[in-house]
Amino acid sequence: MNYLFPERDDFYSLQLLQKPKHSKIFAWWFGGFLLMIFLGLFLPWTQNIKGKGKITAFSPQGRTQAIPSLITGRISKWHISEGQRVTKGDTIVTLEETKEKFLDPRMLERLASQIKSKKSSIGANRAKAQAYSSQIEILKLTSNLSFSKTQNKVEQARQKVRIDSMDLEAVKFENKVQITQLERTEGLLKQGLKSLTETENKRSKYQESMAKLNSAHNKLAYSIQDLQNALIELNTVRAEYQDKIFKAMAEYEATISYVFTAEAEIMKMDNELESLRLRSGFYFILAPQDGFVIKATQAGLGDVVKENEAVINILPINREMAAEIYLRPIDIPLIKSGAPVRLQFEGWPVIVFSGWQGASFGTFGGIVKVVDKVDTDGLYRLLVVPDDSNKKWPEILPMGSGVKAWAMLNDVSIWYEIWREMNGFPPNEVLKSSKKESKYKENK
């Protein structure tokens, strides 16, 4: 039987119909792989936003600083070299003056001497003004006394005119009486009732009264003349003293005006002197803070540096590290101050699973500190500082080195994240916020 009917395995066609030896093993492995992929779709995945940036300092004073020259000058000496550490106040560069106005080496001394002379002149003119002020007061007092004295003379002259006028009236009355008596006596003489002797006596008395009348007229005229002279003297005294007072006041005002003008000039000269002193200090460019010299923007001796032109760059020593990250505008609504961020620094060994940060190696934690309100070339900037609850950032990170960042959002399943990415839907954070807004509108 065995010779007539050999084993089935000896037939080639039957061998082709049989299953391969490893097919079952492959099927099991492939099925297990598909099962693992299927189960893996239900694993948690942390939604995140990617961004790039560089290392910087959080505080502006900790960032690279360009040290400018505050004046235009010629470089006369370098006191440092690139890479050297400097402390605050160290001299970096010494400059020489180039402007003709400030080339005089004794300019400060001469200007100070001019100010001193001007101040002495002001002191002398102040004393002069004080003397004029005293003179004015004395002239006013003397004027009042002289005016009172002359006024008294005027009153005396007026009184004398009144008395002489009264005397004249009395003499006139007496003269009329003498005329009447003389005429009556002469009439009686013609009638033979009076003697010639009595008539001569009456004539003599009449002539005496006429003499008294003329004397009274002259005396009154002299009194009136004296009154006019007294009035003229009064006006003269008033005019003389007013002229003296006005001249003294004019001198006083001129002196005070000179003092004020000189004081204004001194203030201007003081400002100029202070500016020169400050300018002399600007010949030395000093380090504003502790740091390292990283780059000199000027070179050589004798080069002319313009005002406000950078001479050297300094990297401060004491600085708080931060990461400057740039994101697309579409991602900015998802980021808030205080949001967690994972960082990958260039040159640092790393294994990254963006959705499984716990399984990543070489990333560092950070916290969003600042979110810019204005875009920069179409991107928005974040400032991320170290997260104290995570491991410290490397201390050897150079300023300006590149960094990648992942801002952590919600935990979802992998299948959901794949489906969301394929359909271009926003992360759950946006969906939740939009739902809250719609509910709020419905409640309203």
Image (cartoon, rainbow, N blue to C red):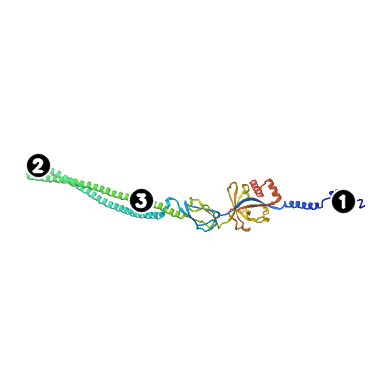
Could you say whether the residue bearing mark 2 is in a helix, strand or loop?
A: helix
Q: Residues within 10 Å of mark 2 (few under 14, many from 20)?
A: many
* 109 relative to 344 in the view: left or right: left
Identified by mark 3, the residue type is Tyr
Disc 3 target residue: 258
Residue 135 appears in the rendering: yes
- What residue would you read off at disc 1? 10
Distance from the alpha carbon under mark 3 to that under mark 1: 137 Å
Q: Distance of mark 2 from mark 1, alpha carbons?
A: 219 Å
Query: At numbered mark 3, what does the secondary structure look like: helix, strand or loop?
Result: helix
Observer-nearest of 128 and 64: 64
Q: Nearer the viewer, residue 240 or 230?
A: 240
Q: Position of residue 393 (x, y in %)?
A: 61, 57
**Residue 166 locus on image (x, y percent):** 19, 47
The reply to whether discs 3 and 1 touch (Cβ–Cβ < 8 Å) is: no
Q: Is residue 170 visible?
A: no
The residue to which callout 2 is attached is 186
Q: Name the spot of residue 403 as percent of width and height, x first.
A: 62, 53
- Tell me the SS state at disc 1: helix
On screen, residue 306 versus residue 353, left or right, reads left
Question: If you read the primary sequence from the N terminus, does the residue marked by circle 3 or circle 1 appear first?
Answer: 1
Q: Nearer the viewer, residue 245 or 370?
A: 370
Pointers 3 and 2 in contact (CB under 8 A)?
A: no
